[in-house]
Amino acid sequence: MPLLNGLSAADRIDIEDLYSRYAWALDTGDVEGFADTFVPQSLVEVCTYTRIPNRYEGRQGAIDLAESLRVWDRFPGCQHYTGQLQLVGDGFGRCEARSYTFMTDCRGEAPYQIRFVGRTRDRLVRCAGIWLYEERLIQLWEGDVSPGFPAPGF
């Protein structure tokens, strides 16, 4: 089977599945399922509106992140979306990924609100036949994201 950027078509489908499992587990309060999308020695860094990154390391860190969101009174009804994945694999079970991401708040009546717009930079590894996050960096859509424009930032 031919490779595109070091990944087979099956790898690309399996990676899309990883992103789906992550979002579904997070948005349905499945803390263990969320933690299962990471390798045991993983790192998640979330840098949002405070611009101070929150770091979560290892399986316990992933559990702590998911649990903190699960019990936050403003979180139920939120949905996470990731798309326009750009993937570059090494052909040996490792992959660098970047994507757009946003979160909607679907509580109450429509129209619903967009609560977060950003980007991710991820390192993925294939373990026991499935793709998992080794590192997940979640950032606002700002800063060095637009170096091709004449004005710095937005």
Image (spheres, rainbow, N blue to C red):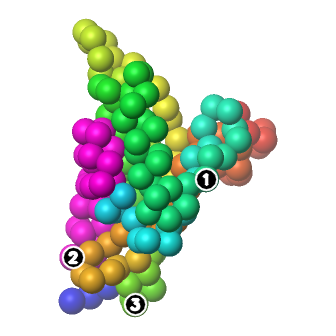
Q: Nearer the viewer, residue 48 or 113?
A: 48
Q: Is residue 99 visible?
A: no
Question: Which residue bears the numbered disc 1?
Answer: 55
Question: Which residue bears the numbered disc 3?
Answer: 92
Q: Is residue 73 left or right of residue 45?
A: left
Q: Is residue 17 magenta?
A: yes
Magenta residues? 8-34
Give the residue drawn at x 30%, y 25%. 77
Q: Is residue 80 left or right of residue 101?
A: left
Mark 3, secondary structure of its residue: loop
Q: Earlier in the sequence, mark 1 or mark 2?
A: 2
Q: Earlier in the sequence, mark 3 or mark 2?
A: 2
**Disc number at residue 10?**
2
Give the residue drawn at x 43%, y 71%. 40
* Of labels 3 and 2, the one closer to you: 3
Mark 2, secondary structure of its residue: helix
